[in-house]
Amino acid sequence: MTKKWITLTAITAIGLVSLTACTDNSQVKEAFQQSVNKQSELKSYTFDGSTTLAISDGLMKSANPLTNGLLSLIRESTITWKGISQVDPLQYQSDLRITPKGSTSPIDIPILIKDSKLYFNMPALNKTADEFYAIDLQKMSSTTTSPLTADTLKNTPQVSTALTKLIFEGLDAKWFKQAKDPIKLSDGSSAKSIQVDLTTKNVKEINTQFQAKLPEFISTLQTNSLLTADKAEALKKNGMATLALKAPSSMKIAIDDQGFIRDQTLDITFSVTLDGKVLDNHITLHQTTDAINQSAPLTKEIPAKVKSFDDILKLLTPAAKK
């Protein structure tokens, strides 16, 4: 009887542990989902981030020579950014630095959005550091030939969040893991850390779920200029199996006590099949968000030396069909 009792107790304990683990994972996934949805409440914030891109040549290539030249700068590069964003009215500033692979000369691009105009300086296009191009966002928003609109720019800092939601929200709760100990944020406060790892054990299951979201995923990449229009169209036409996540990949977020995502790290390897060729790609991204919904006024002033970007923009975007 004693042995039977011990055995029964052990089985019951194992069952309870399994049940508890399942419940905990469900709660972890729920916390993840709530934090992603919470990002819609961002009205103003500061941000700091970086990404390393290793995108195949075939994926980021355009028939337009000027566009192709700009894409070649970022295809294999490290990009860092730091700035301030206010959603309504749209005000934004950032200092973007692009360092192409193997280069010792980074490209610095200061950006300012104020009074419905976007100002930026790009060394490849501007003659001097104090000369800025200006784009009228209200005028741009009224056209159908360009994805560059005020609404798009409002959402651009949250691209990684949007992609995170598309990739991870439909996953089984068992893949969501919360770190035992909270992490410290840059302002000294603590946050809980949740991570999802894509491994050889779950890569098939995750890809099946991910591919159901593929059209929306491709559209998000295109809208935010991470895919050219022709490549996005090719991906959609070639079917769901053209893009697949690969192991190892991972995503980790830190959620503060208000429910906002304050820190996120993305390490994604994926392949794309175009014209019968499998193209491997890798993206790492890390971004922190601070001063959420607090007063964070812009520090950049509207530049005095300004040129219209219309002529160059016509070279980057196809003319509307009559």
Image: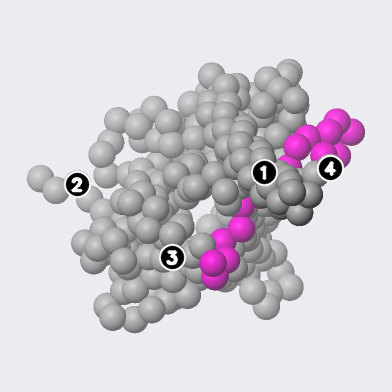
Q: Mark 4 sits on what residue?
A: 181
Q: Choose the circle earlier in sequence order: 2 or 3.
A: 3
Disc count in the image?
4
Looking at numbered disc 4 in the image, what kind of residue is underneath it? Asp
Residue 90 part of the magenta-drawn span:
no
The residue sitting at 85% across, 31% down in the picture is 189
Q: Secondary structure at mark 1?
A: helix
Contact (CB < 8 A) between labels 3 and 1? Answer: no
Q: Quadrant of residue 266?
A: bottom right
The residue sitting at 62% across, 40% down in the picture is 19
Which label was assigned to residue 12? Answer: 1
Q: Mark 2 sits on what residue?
A: 320
Q: Secondary structure at mark 3?
A: helix
Contact (CB < 8 A) between labels 2 and 3? Answer: no
Residue 193 part of the magenta-drawn span:
yes
Is the residue marked by circle 4 packed among few (<14), some (14-19), or many (20+) residues within 10 Å? few
Q: Quadrant of residue 24?
A: top right
Start-end of magenta stretch: 182-201
Residue farthest toward the left in the current orientation of the protein: 322
Looking at numbered disc 3 in the image, what kind of residue is underneath it? Lys
Q: Choose the circle earlier in sequence order: 3 or 4.
A: 4
